[in-house]
Image (cartoon, rainbow, N blue to C red):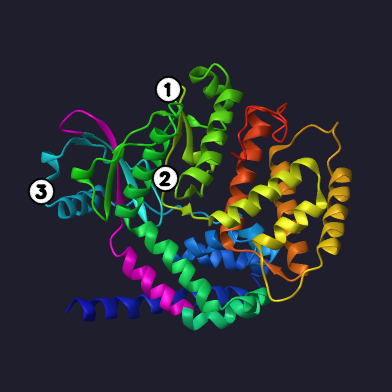
């Protein structure tokens, strides 16, 4: 019976998808014609969960998609209406198999946050601990699977949109999206990620960073109960000053913790935007939301490490050699020519960012994004194709670059001896 019900839901979902696409088409005919990347982003936002996630995948994959799409999808908003508290309470009860009152003495009916896959509520356990409960929205997995199967059929559209995709099989990319999305739907995996990262902090004697404790007796595949962290985002300099005597030191702790995880933890946090990095009231750095993590093979990491070392000293031959080792290619790459192109890019950059102009946060982020995309493009023009994990890694570097500008504008990331970037 479940299969039949899911089949009917799936059919309805495809109908819903086609009606949104139809409305977009009608708007186009009537003359409402935003640029194609923006039109696609707005359509994705209307389609909800899967397409929002797909948009975010495009935003974090400059190695797969054209620059104008990567840039537009940075604005892909994952904000969805709150589900009524009654629905949330029922899900928690069904998942835990007992009345919520036996587990929580209090749950705030107003959500702290609501995204396409889950909704988060503050609560208190009957034993007195302050927690947050992450609750998966009903039907999300069925919608994801239906949408992803529909995407298989629509893959041709994306192939015409992004000719580079012929490099890898389109179905391979849909499979990758499916894998990451389904991982995000499985809170047991996220709970495990939190545990592994917690053990990594313990094993490396790192007492300056923290991850929320998971309460396993009230966590399942669709409900995750975690210790509640009180603090402020890493970008809120004024508030940080109230919690930490030295904001620069706090930033160095965050960066060193993340760099250490690249070699000493089985994954790295692959979404260190300001909402996921907090400065706690006791001055520690809190890493939250381990729904998206990246795994990188040790030989690839060695090449990335060499790449960073080469960037530090401006060794273009070293950069070219490392890029060739990171990338995948079907042809012989001329390292000397690649190095020459990288040198030209750097010379342009020096002209682009004069030292005497004051720092503009948005502008600088755009510049750094453009540099990343240009480096990737230069690699690709030489026949290299980079794994998505490399793009995810570089994206986190860009976030940290932004935090340095906000919290420690005088700091030279490549020369500061307090930073253990490569250890």
**Badge 2: few (under 14), some or many (20 or more) residues near its Cα, within 10 Å?**
some
**How far from the left and from the top, in percent, is residue 49?**
42, 62
Give SS at disc 3: loop
Q: Which one is nearer the viewer's eye here, 377 or 315?
A: 315
- Which of 90/332 is in front? 332
Which quadrant of the figure has residue 179? bottom left
Question: Mark 2 = which residue?
Answer: 289
Q: Earlier in the sequence, mark 3 or mark 2?
A: 3
Q: What residue sits right under mark 3 in the picture?
A: 98
Q: Position of residue 50 (x, y in %)?
A: 44, 65
Q: Is residue 336 above or below residue 419?
A: below
Location of residue 333 with respect to 118 vertically, above or below: below
Residue under label 1, please give it.
281
Where does the N terminus fall, quadrant-wise? bottom left
Q: Residues within 10 Å of mark 3 (few under 14, many from 20)?
A: few
First reached walking from the N terminus: tag 2 or tag 1: 1
Q: Nearer the viewer, residue 92 or 198?
A: 198
- Asked if disc 2 and disc 1 are in contact, CB closer than 8 Å, the reply is no
Give the camera-side residue of 38 and 102: 102
Residue 66 vertical position relative to residue 134 in the rendered view, above or below: below
Q: Position of residue 101 (x, y in %)?
A: 12, 40
Of callouts 1 and 3, the N-terminal one = 3
Residue 366 in the figure: left or right of residue 122: right
Q: Distance from label 1 to label 3 (Cα)?
A: 34 Å
Residue at the spot 33% in from the left edge and 45% down from the top edge: 120
- The residue range painted magenta reads 125-151
Q: Secondary structure at mark 2?
A: loop
Q: Does any portion of residue 61 appear in the rendered image? A: yes
Q: Residue at x 71, y 56 (%)?
A: 322
- Reply above or below: 215 against 337: above
Q: Residue at x 29, y 41 (%)?
A: 214
């Amino acid at each position: 019976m479940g299969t039949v019900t899911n089949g009917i839901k799936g059919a309805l979902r495809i109908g819903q998808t086609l009606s949104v696409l139809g409305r977009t088409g009608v708007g186009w005919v009537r003359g409402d014609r935003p640029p194609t990347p923006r039109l696609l982003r707005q359509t994705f936002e209307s389609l909800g969960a899967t397409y929002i996630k797909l948009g975010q995948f495009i935003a974090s994959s400059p190695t797969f998609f054209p620059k104008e799409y990567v840039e537009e999808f940075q604005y892909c908003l994952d904000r969805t209406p709150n589900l009524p508290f009654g629905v949330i309470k029922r899900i928690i009860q069904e998942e835990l198999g007992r009345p919520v009152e036996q587990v929580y003495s209090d749950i705030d009916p107003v959500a702290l946050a609501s995204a396409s896959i889950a909704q988060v509520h503050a609560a208190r356990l009957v034993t007195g601990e302050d927690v947050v409960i992450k609750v998966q929205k009903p039907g999300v997995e069925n919608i994801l699977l239906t949408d992803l199967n529909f995407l298989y059929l629509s893959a041709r559209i994306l192939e015409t949109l992004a000719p580079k995709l012929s490099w890898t099989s389109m179905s391979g990319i849909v499979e990758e999206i499916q894998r990451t999305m389904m991982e995000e739907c499985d809170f047991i995996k996220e709970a495990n990620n939190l545990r592994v990262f917690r053990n990594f902090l313990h094993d490396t004697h790192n007492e300056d960073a923290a991850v929320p404790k998971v309460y396993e007796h009230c966590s399942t595949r669709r409900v995750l109960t975690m210790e509640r962290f009180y603090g402020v985002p890493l970008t809120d300099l004024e508030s940080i000053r109230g919690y930490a005597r030295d904001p620069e030191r706090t930033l160095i702790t965050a960066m060193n913790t993340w760099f250490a995880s690249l070699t000493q933890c089985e994954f790295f946090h692959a979404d260190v935007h300001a909402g996921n990095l907090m400065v706690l009231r006791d001055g520690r750095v809190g890493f939250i939301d381990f729904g998206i993590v990246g795994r990188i093979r040790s030989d690839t990491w060695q090449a990335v490490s060499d790449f960073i070392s080469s960037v530090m000293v401006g060794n273009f031959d070293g950069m070219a050699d490392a890029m060739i080792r990171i990338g995948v290619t079907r042809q012989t790459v001329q390292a000397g020519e690649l190095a020459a192109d990288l040198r030209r890019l750097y010379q342009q950059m020096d002209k682009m960012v004069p030292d005497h102009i004051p720092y503009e946060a948005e502008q600088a982020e755009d510049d750094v994004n453009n540099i990343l995309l240009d480096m990737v493009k230069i690699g690709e023009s030489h026949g290299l194709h980079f794994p998505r994990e490399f793009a995810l890694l570089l994206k986190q570097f860009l976030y940290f670059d932004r935090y340095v500008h906000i919290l420690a504008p005088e700091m030279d990331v490549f020369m500061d001896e307090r930073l253990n970037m490569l250890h």
